[in-house]
Image (spheres, helix red, strand yellow):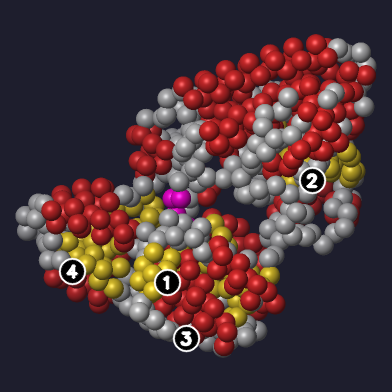
Amino acid sequence: MLPDIPKEKQLVILRKMLMIRRVEEHCIRFNEEHTGLLRGHFHVYIGQEATGVSVCDWLNRDDYVFTTHRNHGHVIAKGGDPKKVLAEIIGRATGYCQGRAGTFHVAAPEVGIIHTSAIVGGCLALAAGTAYAAQVKAEKTVTVVFFGDGAMEEGVFYEALNIAKLWQLPMIFWMENNYRRATRAAGHAATELTNVPKALGVEAGVIDGMDVGTVHKTAAEVVGRVRAGEGPLFVEARTHLWPGNAFNMPKLVGGVMEIAWAWDPNKAPERVREWHKDADPILKYVRDLERSGVSRDEIATLDAEVRREADEAARFALDSPLPEARAALQYAFAGKGN
Amino acid sequence: MPQEITFGEALLAAIDEVAEQDKSIVLFNPSFAGEAGQEKLAAFRKKYAARIKFPPIAEIGFCGIATGAAMAGLRPIVDLSTATFSYEAMPQIVNEAAIAYSNSGGNTNVPVVFYLKFGIRGGGGVQHSGSPQSWYWNTPGLQVVMPSTPADAKGLMRTVLTKSQDPTVFFGHERLLDNRGSVPDGTFEISLGKADVKREGNDLTIIATSIQVPRALAAAEKLSSEGISAEVIDPRTLQPLDKPALLASVKKTGRVVITDESHDNCGVAAGLAAIIADEGFTALRAPIRRVSIPPVPVPYSVPLEDYVTPTAERIVEAARALAHIKNL
């Protein structure tokens, strides 16, 4: 379903989701078409765009968002600059962290993403920390911590959740269940993961994370309630693993997505056809928009604009200089301190 | 005929040989093999399926479970994969496994092995490039093993699994895993606390650990073309440490470069330098030089990462400077 907002705002959401998709496609292409740009593992947000974009639509610039090793999408959803994201992914001096952080740790303090950890569960307690700070400072900011199902296997999840509840911290535990862990090993004894927060008295719900309207509505409610002092709350948004994520390193198994697959799914390559037809949150949203009267031309034009912008961002990243080698010794400390 | 196998395959082979006989060996998340050894790893996992667990992402939990199981008579081998993931398990490794024998007045043995893939791997960035060997060396009660060759890896792992009753942190550098080397036929053990001279020389000593050994050997080759004869010595284990062998080499050459891939401050090189200053001072004819990582989190971007990596070139520069210092 469509979110209950004016059409132009609905299209802003589409634009952001498409931007994430196009940026992630470039990220994978960096790896597939170049040697040595991405030297280690990386992770992409393809297939989860609906949750990040819909949640961040209800957040202000000074609200805090914490993310994971799968951070590129959240940074863009929160208002981050695709140029600086792609530049950071390939270690350029023009990236958000001047090339020090790389794909795993893109952080963008200017949009409220002040630190990113690639350690599973690494940000859960930190998020409770920014929520605590907001409480102490009597600010109305909320903190949203995005994490995956795997993070609930870590002890810090329980500790942070328990303290957040005891102290009534203004934060949302937003779990994006992409079933990545479930494809490898059953990592959790609970059959319903939301039973875990419920046991601590934290209100928790499960939603379809592939449907923009559903996520947007839930996000409006939980952000509003947490801002009003009813935190913490917990949401499990269920997503369907994008076929290109089923490997150790993401692969563009169906090539770059064509927007026309929304209305002509049989044009999609076989390996990804079913996913784009039944699961893809972007193409599903496109079909919802079309049914509400947005023309295919309008959607195709918007996608073409986003692609151009993403292409420019990728070009910017590739053309950007690497940091000076000697800069390696900077930033261990903010001050001299010794 | 000695075989040529990789570092990763050597670890697997050592564990396989012992586990066949010793049913008390259990494994959590065995992934030792590197790229080249994937087939052997698959076969190993199949063979020992009944004794292998792939626990949830819960390091503090499964390291504690392994420690407890060791106290109860099993011999667990925990592959933590990336070394920095062991930071999530610090309380159990450092504050339980390491102290239990001492705390019990010598009654409780903890023969657990924590295997850590460590070091600057290329693009690992601030959270996946860690070298915590000095932290563990700084923890009484833990044995610290860091071999540089497949043969040493195999022989040391066998000793740990057959002779040791103490908790062991076993380090394999990411960039060593696929290195090939000759390994003697049959079963063999290498004693813990026995250093190995990897190249003999007279003008200066390079003490090198793990990945720094091949780098030091490359440096020694370069130095020899400049007329400087460098001895390369590998302690192979930090705890126990073969002090006599290191001091004997320093006594012979009077000049020493120490290289390890942990950070400069309170790093392994610093610890070894202190021992040489304490116990080998009169043999020194020049200051001790360290080649390790400057005190900054390992950055992601290529030029930044290269800048902090203790390369063969940096060892050569340090050695060259020492060799030209006249007697103190």
Label 4 SS: loop
Q: Quadrant for residue B196, please give it.
A: bottom left
> Is A222 placed above or below A287 here?
below
In the picture, measured across the screen, residue B260 lies left or right of residue A51, that is left
Q: What is the spatial separation of the Cα atoms under label 2 and label 4, in whole angstroms?
A: 57 Å
What residue does disc 2 label?
A177
Label 3 vs 1, first from the N-terminus = 1
Query: Where residue B89 sits: x, y (%)?
Result: 60, 62
Residue drawn at 57 percent across, 45 percent down = A41
The amino acid beneath tag 4 is Glu
Label 3 SS: helix
The dominant secondary structure in magenta is loop
Residue drawn at 67 percent across, 29 percent down = A256
Disc ID at residue B153: 1
Q: What is the spatial separation of the Cα atoms under label 3 and label 1, in whole angstroms?
A: 15 Å
Query: Where residue B157 sits: x, y (%)?
Result: 46, 76
The amino acid beneath tag 1 is Ala
Disc ID at residue B163: 3
Label 3 vs 4, first from the N-terminus = 3
Q: What is the spatial separation of the Cα atoms under label 1 and label 2, in whole angstroms?
A: 40 Å
